């Protein structure tokens, strides 16, 4: 009797141990229904700003400049005002460029911007020589400062001062006229003879020989007239429109 009882007891204990082992294994692979749900990762909210002027591309901020053909349509169209009272000194009181840099003037500043392979004088801002790819003719000019050579490269007022005077600048105060005459936006280093040929002509009377530059040239004139609230004549407007019809995506320059 005792031997049989022991066998039964051992068998029962074995069954209980096996059951406990199976329960522990099952518990490791099965989540309890009372376990809390894992928290979801927070979602970052990005607010987008409605900005037509700027957008980001590949991490770089890009400015969209207005189209010249659209800005042209904003300019008033009038007849030329009388030239009475005009002189260069209405824009440049001393008749010369404003001073800039280390004792130099705006002419040196524009030469520095537009020429390549520049050699400067001892003061670090007087341009002694350089190379200009002339926008008006497309020619390459090797500039050397000198009494008989400096005039090969001249600084042109893209909107001539006489033209500006007759299209609204006479209504500006002296400080604004001085700013117009010394504004980088209205200045280009160009071929001397081409500048002399242009004189005070508007776009209806003269355009650069270099046809590839005409869109940029007209856009720059429009930019100056917009900035200083000048107007255009009907003939000038039509000439500008004719140029920009071939390049409707031409944007406005900023400097």
Image (cartoon, rainbow, N blue to C red):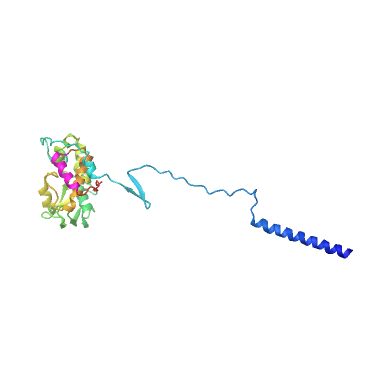
Q: Is residue 236 magenta?
A: yes
x, y percent for residue 128 = 18, 56
Pick the residue in front: 19 or 105.
19
The correct choice, above or below, for 144 with respect to 175 in the image is below
In front of the other: 136 or 116 = 136
**From where the camera sits, is residue 156 visible?**
yes
Quadrant of the image occupied by residue 235? top left
Tell me where residue 153 appears, x and y as whole percent. Answer: 15, 53
The span shown in magenta is 232-245
State whether the magenta stretch is mostly helix, strand or loop.
helix
The answer to whether residue 129 shows anywhere in this view is no
Give the residue displayed 34% in from the left and 45% down from the top: 54
Query: How far from the left and from the top, in percent, is residue 152?
Result: 13, 54
Q: How many marks?
A: 0
The quadrant of the rendering that contains the N terminus is bottom right
Find out whether residue 241 is within the magenta segment. Answer: yes
């Amino acid at each position: 009797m005792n031997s049989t009882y022991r066998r039964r007891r051992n068998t029962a204990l074995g069954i209980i141990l096996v059951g406990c082992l199976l329960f522990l294994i099952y518990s490791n692979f099965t989540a309890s229904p009372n376990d809390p749900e894992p928290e979801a990762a927070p979602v970052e909210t990005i607010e987008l700003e409605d900005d037509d002027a700027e957008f980001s591309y590949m991490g770089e901020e890009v400015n969209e400049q207005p189209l010249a053909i659209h800005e042209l349509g904003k300019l008033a169209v009038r007849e030329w005002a009388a030239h009475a009272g005009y002189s260069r000194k209405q824009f440049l009181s001393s008749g010369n460029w404003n001073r800039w840099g280390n004792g130099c003037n705006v002419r040196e500043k524009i030469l520095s911007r537009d020429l390549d392979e520049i050699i400067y004088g001892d003061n670090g801002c007087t341009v002694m020589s350089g190379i200009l790819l002339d926008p008006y003719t497309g020619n390459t000019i090797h500039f050397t400062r000198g009494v008989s050579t400096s005039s090969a490269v001249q600084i042109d007022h893209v909107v001539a001062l006489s033209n500006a005077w007759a299209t609204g600048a006479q209504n500006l105060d002296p400080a604004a006229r001085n700013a117009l005459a010394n504004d980088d936006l209205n200045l280009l280093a160009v071929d001397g003879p081409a500048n002399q040929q242009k004189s005070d002509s508007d776009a209806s009377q003269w355009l650069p020989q270099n046809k590839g530059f005409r869109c940029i040239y007209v856009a720059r004139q429009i930019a100056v007239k917009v900035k200083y609230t000048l107007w255009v004549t009907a003939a000038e407007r039509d000439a500008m429109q004719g140029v920009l019809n071939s390049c409707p995506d031409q944007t406005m320059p900023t400097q």
